[in-house]
Image (cartoon, rainbow, N blue to C red):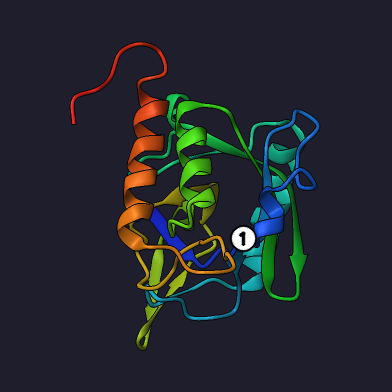
Amino acid sequence: MKQILIETIPFTVSPVQLTEGMRAPSGNPMVEGVLATAEVKNGNGRYYSKDLWNREIDKYQEVVNQNRACGELDHPESQIINLKNVSHIIRKIWWDGDKVLGKIEILPTTAGNILKALIENNVMVGVSSRGMGSLKEIGETMEVQDDFELLCFDFVSTPSNPGSYMHLIKEGKENNANSYLKINSILTDILCANGTCPLF
């Protein structure tokens, strides 16, 4: 039986990725890194073969080419990509050994502005694949079956795998309390930009 399959892996962003040198033609910031890994048992105990990922990345390449490779900030247990929650779009996707890499444009949407603020302020977030498929138990491993279909890649605040976070590496140290206050202020400014503030 098919089910939603969500996998999270580390996605490390270097400081140079958010400078003027890493901008899309639109002027939006770009980041790049590993989106998925084949041929390993992941933190959820699931195994994806390279052939399976190869097939899905080939299909997803069409979505990228058609400017439809959007993802959400925090993903739902759903097959549908909710456009009001879109934070980014994948502009390029390719293989490096057993790893799937991607170049991602952060969009100036409400969710995208929040994602950008979090990354710029060294808040750790994860990147996750979202797909539909069934599993077969083989020993202690759940093998993802041939009916798997990749839906998108999302950014998440609470990854399914412990330690699977994306973060911005900065030189020097910052006081954690001051960082949280700064992030809270940025998020409030973004959410209240239209003249109405949500209740917290």
Regarding residue 110, the answer to whether it shows in the image is yes
- Image quarter where the C terminus lies is top left
Total numbered labels placed on residues in the image: 1
Q: Which residue is mark 1?
A: 13
Q: Is residue 140 above or below residue 48?
A: below
Neighbor class of circle 1 (other Cα within 10 Å; few <14, some 14-19, many 20+) is many
User: What amino acid is at disc 1?
Assistant: Val
Residue drawn 60% across and 71% down? 37
Check the image and name the residue furthest to the left.
Answer: 200
Residue 98 left/right relative to 119: right
- Residue 57: image location, x then y, percent: 68, 54
Q: Is residue 51 above or below residue 107?
A: below
- Residue 116: image location, x then y, percent: 53, 42
Residue drawn 64% across and 54% down? 56
Residue 176 left/right relative to 144: left
Q: Nearer the viewer, residue 177 or 22?
A: 177
Regarding residue 2, the answer to whether it shows in the image is no
Check the image and name the residue furthest to the top.
Answer: 195
- Residue 127: image location, x then y, percent: 50, 56
Q: Secondary structure at mark 1?
A: loop
Q: Is residue 34 above or below residue 190?
A: below
Residue drawn 71% across and 40% down? 64
Q: Nearer the viewer, residue 200 or 71?
A: 200
- Image quarter where the N terminus lies is bottom left
- Residue 25: image location, x then y, percent: 81, 32
